Amino acid sequence: MYSQKEYVELLKQFPPRPIKSEKDLEETQARVNYLLYKPKNIMAALREHIMNSPSEFYHNS
């Protein structure tokens, strides 16, 4: 499982942002695929972060 520190590092490397182009979509999908197939389960860290601060994910939608 990922720690909060690892999750923050992920956010620094690939901060959430709107997908505005095909290139943005491809880059985002590549990153998602990379995370899905990593041996550690980042999904638990993501769920924990979302549950603790859901407004961050809906603010600029």
Image: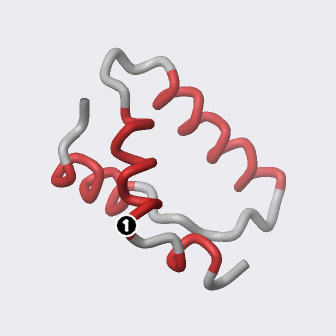
Element on which disc 1 rests: helix
Residue 5 is situated, as x and y percent measured from the top left of the image, at: 16, 53
Total number of numbered discs in the rendering: 1
Q: Amino acid at mark 1?
A: Asn
Density class for disc 1 (Cα within 10 Å; few <14, some 14-19, many ≥20) is: few
Q: Residue at x 31, y 22 (%)?
A: 40
Horizontally, residue 53 falls left or right of residue 30, namely left
Structure colour scheme: secondary structure
Q: Residue at x 37, y 35 (%)?
A: 42
Which residue is label 1 attached to?
52
Residue 56 is situated, as x and y percent measured from the top left of the image, at: 51, 77
Horizontally, residue 50 falls left or right of residue 30, namely left
Q: Residue at x 21, y 52 (%)?
A: 4
The quadrant holding residue 9 is: bottom left
Residue 50 is situated, as x and y percent measured from the top left of the image, at: 46, 60
The quadrant holding residue 29 is: top right
Q: Residue at x 53, y 65 (%)?
A: 16
Name, please, the residue furthest toward the front: 51
Name, please, the residue furthest toward the bottom: 59
| Nearer the observer, 29 or 55 | 55
